[in-house]
Image: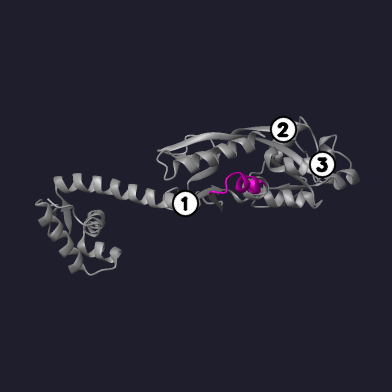
Amino acid sequence: MTTPSLNALRVFEVVSRHASFRLGAEELGVTQAAVAQQIRGLEAGLGIKLFERLPRGLALTDAGRTYVASIRKAFELIDEATRALRPEPTHLTISVTPSLASRWLIPRLSRFTEAHPGIDLRVLATERLSHFHNDGVDIAVRYGRPPFGPGLNAELLFDQRIVAVGSPALLDNLGMPQRVDDLHDYMLLHDAHNLWPQFIAQAFDQPLAVPPKNVRFNQTSLAIEAAIAGQGLALASHFFVQDDIHAGRLRCITAHKLDMDTGFYLVWPRKSRQPAAQAVVRQWLMEQASA
């Protein structure tokens, strides 16, 4: 028995995935007749029937299923060996919310590219819950509590601890709020979570008797930007504003932190397409969160 040509084996692998001569021909960019001829020649050379011809499509025989599994592994080895000769950057996609991207991740990305030039990181910033398979996402940062779904791993990135912040110029002008009624001097900047009533009740031991002045945003990052611009007081995760606090752009109005029973979690599929690169990115994100 002679060893089949690589071309015939490639045709066999493609046709087995589609269970169709027509679809296999479309992927390969050749005619359906050429594909059928390659399969007939391969079966004749091996002396084994690889496909059952059905009224609608094809079905692998037992011998065909065993053979194609080995052929796919062989092609994977060839592909890996070829890529090893001329390594290209590994592409990896991380899905995060726009606020987390702008307030925490993006300011740190230069550190990642310097440390790991071989990984081309793509940031998908969206409020929509991304799907790992359909959207090509390798890692996501999700807010909530695990479990996040079957077949997914989850690791806590950081707890959700809410602080109230304002610009130093605004606080110097109006005075640091000491009592709950002092908040009437300020505009309260809300995001979609609407945590001000809960925060005020805890921080000042009582709610506001009279409704305050309010401005509402659909994203936390917008409320933070408005606070930096001196428009009012904002609530945000401490991780989102810690750089601004250290830089003097924001100041906490009280030492109180509102601890939530939810947090930001790294979430990734148990069956990863690029486990080595994914592990590197996860470790880097955890290091940044604990720094």
Which is in the foreground here, disc 2 or disc 3?
Answer: 2
Left or right, 128 with reference to 52: right
Q: How many marks?
A: 3
Q: Nearer the viewer, residue 214 or 91?
A: 91
Say which amino acid is labelled 3.
Leu
Alpha carbon of mark 1 to alpha carbon of mark 3: how far? Answer: 58 Å
Mark 1, other Cα within 10 Å: few <14 / some 14–19 / many ≥20: few
What whole-number distance in Å separates the C-alpha atoms at marks 2 and 3? 17 Å
Where the C terminus falls, by quadrant?
top right
Q: Which residues are magenta?
A: 108-118
Q: State the residue position of label 1.
A: 87
Main SS of the magenta segment? helix
On screen, residue 144 versus residue 180, left or right, reads left
Left or right for 198, reference 23? right
Q: Residue 70: percent from the left, percent from the top?
A: 24, 45
> Is there a contact, CB below 8 Å, between mark 2 and mark 3?
no
User: Which residue is more in the foreground, 21 or 176?
Assistant: 21
Residue 9 spot, x, y in % from top left: 23, 55
Residue 257 — which label? 2
Residue that label 3 marks: 183
- Relative height, residue 72 to residue 280 (above, below): below
